[in-house]
């Protein structure tokens, strides 16, 4: 059971932190964002059939997500973390359209399913790439959150990276929080 | 194993030890509404011998009551403390369920917790083989603990 | 005579995605059957002759590996080739599936070409 004070410390994580040598090297942030960019690009090139461009890491994002769809997937094992994708509704619908051949006019069950499946596939791509570095992670199951105004907070003082991607339908954001071994 | 019992035991114990609050389990629900209004959900992923997630869903009012008792402070809005406390509740509940699973010979590991909240949001997780939706009553209202677990082959 | 395929996945959306990729890969199945888990798949197979099966691994009720185990015990369906679809290539569970007679695997994400390569050899 985690001690109570952990809860009090779970804030102040709105920006990329200065590196602490030997622990959370900035090169690790670059390493993980590179793997996530590759994995995401692969999912889009093979299955979504939509052009996607990786943008520069962002230091922060707005807390509140408006008219969006998010999928959250827990990661444990060699790396304890959580991976989330946040898509404006239009992007989520177009991704669903890319995968299924027809773009739904509203955020229905299929749109939510595809965003859950997408975070699952990106995490699968991360898992394979980490395995090549002798780091074996295990994946939980995706949860999908959608609405006109909601928040998703990945809790922990762990390192965070925010990696945006540009598509014809707009920008979506990949968020990854990670700490050392479980 | 009896997952519902494990959820009840974990929840009652954590509320009694950490919050000194007695909670009463209701009857397990066959399914739940996907839509939450003025609420907050804490969730944590589980992976390894089982794959899944544990979530606690509650209204803002109940979340603030839990946080106030948990941290021993007055809580008037759904601030960072509330999100952290509800995420941490999910983390502790999952930790306790994990212990009963490992006694069963299945090793699982937890992810970093998350908290989701808003005026109106949908929260969906594919129903896994072992699903528990257990409502609980406490003095300030009700909350729901959700466990979705899928046993992994050896 | 046209061929029949059975797609097993607990997500109906994923079943649609797989069905679409079969069409994109140039397969012209007469019938595409679907099942939400291994148990449902066994029920479908008790009434239908199927040429090939595409199956997810992680599913409720009866997962892909348990499905293979049950299928191997049934003389009527034992020889239908199965291809596993998974996000976790190289994992223990996939190895077990191959040991239990799965003819191959397709890792998600996959291209129509990969579907063509894996399935083409079996049909």
Image (cartoon, coloured by chain):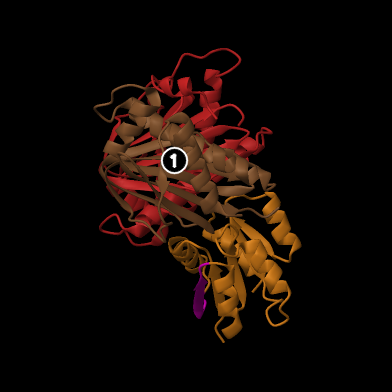
Above or below, comparing residue C54 to residue C109 in the picture: below
Above or below, comparing residue A18 to residue B20 in the picture: above
Relative depth, front residue between C117 and B154: B154
Residue A4 place in picture, x, y as percent:
47, 23
Residue A149 place in picture, x, y as percent:
24, 41
Which residue does the image show at 67% across and 36% down from the upper left?
A132
- Left of C112 or right of it: where is B24? left
Relative depth, front residue between A71 and C87: A71
Above or below, comparing residue A164 to residue C98 in the picture: above
Image quarter for residue A135?
top right
Image quarter for residue B64?
top left
Q: Secondary structure at mark 1?
A: strand
- Left of C121 or right of it: where is A118? left
Relative depth, front residue between B115 and B90: B90
What color was chain B assigned in the picture? Answer: brown
Q: Which residues are magenta?
A: C28-36
Above or below, comparing residue B119 to residue B153 in the picture: above
Count of labels in the image: 1
Q: Which residue is mark 1?
A: B43
Circle 1 residues within 10 Å: few <14, some 14–19, many ≥20: many
Residue A87 place in picture, x, y as percent:
34, 43
Q: Residue furthest right?
A: C99
| Residue A54 visible from this viewpoint | no
Q: What quarter of the picture does the N terminus of chain B occupy?
A: bottom right
Q: Which chain is orange?
A: C
Residue A40 place in picture, x, y as percent:
47, 42
What color was chain A assigned in the picture? Answer: red
Which residue does the image show at 43% across and 19% down from the upper left?
A9
Magenta span has A85? no
Which residue does the image show at 42% across and 30% down from the upper left?
B19
Q: Residue furthest bottom?
A: C1
């Amino acid at each position: 059971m985690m001690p109570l004070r952990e809860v009090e410390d779970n804030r102040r994580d709105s920006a990329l932190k200065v590196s602490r040598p030997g622990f959370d090297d900035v090169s690790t942030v670059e390493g993980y964002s590179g793997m996530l960019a590759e994995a995401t690009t692969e999912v889009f090139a093979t299955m979504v059939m939509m052009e996607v461009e990786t943008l520069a890491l962002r230091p922060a994002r707005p807390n509140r997500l408006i008219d969006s769809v998010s999928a959250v997937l827990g990661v444990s094992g060699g790396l304890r973390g959580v991976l989330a994708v946040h898509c404006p509704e239009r992007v989520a619908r177009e991704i669903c359209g890319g995968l299924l051949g027809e773009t739904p006019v509203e955020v229905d069950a299929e749109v939510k399913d595809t965003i859950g499946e997408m975070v699952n596939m990106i995490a699968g791509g991360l898992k394979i790439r980490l395995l090549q570095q002798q780091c074996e992670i295990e994946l939980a199951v995706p949860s999908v959150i959608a609405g006109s105004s909601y928040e998703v907070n990945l809790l922990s003082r762990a390192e965070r990276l925010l990696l945006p991607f540009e598509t014809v339908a707009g920008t979506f954001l990949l968020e990854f929080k990670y700490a050392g071994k479980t | 194993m009896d997952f519902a019992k494990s959820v009840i035991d974990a929840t009652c114990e954590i509320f009694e030890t950490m919050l000194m609050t007695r909670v009463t389990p209701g009857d397990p629900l066959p399914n739940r509404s996907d839509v939450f209004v003025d609420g907050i959900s804490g969730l944590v992923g589980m992976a390894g011998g089982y794959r899944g997630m544990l979530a606690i869903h509650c209204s803002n009012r109940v979340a603030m009551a839990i946080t106030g008792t948990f941290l021993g402070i007055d809580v008037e809005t759904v601030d960072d403390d509330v999100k952290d406390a509800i995420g941490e509740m999910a983390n502790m509940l999952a930790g306790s369920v994990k212990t009963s699973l490992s006694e069963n010979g299945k090793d699982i590991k937890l992810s970093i917790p998350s908290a989701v909240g808003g005026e109106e949001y949908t929260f969906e997780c594919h129903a896994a083989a072992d699903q528990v939706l257990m409502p609980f009553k406490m003095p300030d209202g009700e909350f729901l603990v959700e466990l979705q677990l899928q046993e992994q082959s050896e | 005579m046209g061929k029949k395929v059975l797609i097993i996945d607990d997500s109906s959306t994923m079943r649609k995605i797989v069905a679409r990729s079969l069409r994109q890969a140039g397969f012209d199945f007469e019938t595409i059957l679907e099942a939400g888990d291994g148990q449902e798949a066994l029920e479908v197979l008790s009434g239908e002759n199927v040429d090939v099966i595409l199956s997810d691994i992680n599913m409720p009720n009866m997962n892909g590996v348990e499905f293979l185990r049950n299928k191997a015990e049934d003389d009527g369906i034992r020889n239908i080739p199965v291809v596993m679809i998974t996000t976790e290539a190289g994992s223990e569970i996939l190895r077990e599936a191959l040991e239990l007679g799965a003819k191959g695997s397709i890792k998600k994400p996959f291209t129509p070409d990969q579907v063509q390569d894996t399935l083409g050899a079996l049909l």
